[in-house]
Image (cartoon, rainbow, N blue to C red):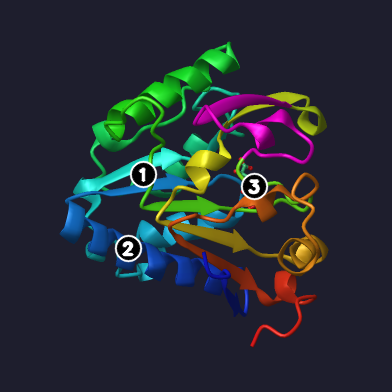
Amino acid sequence: MEGPEIRVLADVGEVCRAAAEEFVRQADGFVRTNGRFTVALSGGSTPRGLYRLLAGEGESALPGRIPWRQIHVFWGDERHVPPDHPDSNYRMAREALLSRVPVPPENIHRIPAENPDAVFAAEQYAQTLHDAFRLTAGQFPRFDLILLGMGPDGHTASLFPGTEALRERERPVVAQWVETFQASRITLTLPVLNNAACVIFLVAGQEKAETLRAVLQGGGQPDRFPAQLIRPARGRLLWILDRAAARLLTSLG
Ligand code: 6PG
């Protein structure tokens, strides 16, 4: 895999606009060639602006350019909370986007994180992936697009530094206790993330600058900076950054 593409834009609004254009282009392309577009959404706060743009906020003409009825929506990770919980990644995406565009309900494949047993919720989501991608035994789903963020500690999805989930190579989805939050998360694992046709990181904010420098231009410390482990074997890796997050990066060409 060649090195990642890195785009630096003025601010988080421009980051979301660039990501939205990528989303439109890829959705259109995959629907034309495959009849559907499979995307795993990321959680947190950065992508909310992207989801709102895709829903047409700010008079964007975007919604009309997207074949919503052929899109299948998944999540890269989820907090271990019910879907109506304020921390739910599903709830954020539903409020910002999915309640405002005509994605068929049967095409929305959320992680069943309301299940009190996080391990069982992970197994249920793995079954959802198996069915939606018509997988054979041992096969991993190949998403057309996976959206990711990066925390100030270098985590991505819910792959946190020093956790067992970083070493998972058999299961597509795992539940992981996260000491920092004293809570469990459910997350896609590296075999799935690195099997995608395209992974786009959206990273904004000066609080990410130091970690971003370490991830992109520091030595390999994947256990400390899990975002370094994202290298799609047969896919495209694109980092869309704002100037504040990219301020410590050197010689970007
Ligand atoms: C989550 C996300 C997580 C997020 C990063 C960045 O469930 O919170 O999947 O990996 O992308 O923490 O979050 P921000 O975009 O809010 O900085």
Q: Is residue 76 visible?
A: no
- 133 or 182: nearer the eye? 133
Q: Amino acid at mark 1?
A: Leu
Horizontal side, residue 122 vs residue 71: left or right: right
Quickly name the residue at label 1.
98
In this rendering, the answer to whether 5 lies above or below 161 is below
Residue occupying image coordinates x 37% and y 62%? 23
Specify whether tag 3 is near ligand 1 (CB below 8 Å). yes
**What is the number of the mark on residue 223?**
none
Residue 208 is a magenta residue: no
Horizontal side, residue 133 vs residue 89: left or right: left
Residue 167 is a magenta residue: yes
State the extent of the magenta-drawn residues as a range.
158-177
Furthest residue toward bottom: 253
Q: Is residue 1 visible?
A: yes
In this rendering, the answer to whether 78 lies above or below 146 is above
**What is the number of the mark on residue 156?**
3
**Quadrant including the C terminus:** bottom right
Give the secondary structure at mark 1: helix
Nearer mark to the viewer, of 2 and 1:
2
Where is residue 207? Give x, y as percent: 79, 61
Where is residue 221? Give x, y as percent: 79, 53
Give the secondary structure at mark 2: helix
Quickly name the residue at label 2.
26
Q: Mark 2 to mark 3: distance in Å?
A: 22 Å
Q: Contact, CB < 8 Å: mark 1 with mark 3?
A: no
Q: Amino acid at mark 3?
A: Thr
Horizontal side, residue 200 vs residue 203: left or right: left
The answer to which image quadrant residue 138 occupies is top left
Q: Amino acid at mark 2?
A: Gln
Mark 2 and mark 3 lie on one chain; the one further toward the N terminus is 2
Mark 2 and mark 1 lie on one chain; the one further toward the N terminus is 2
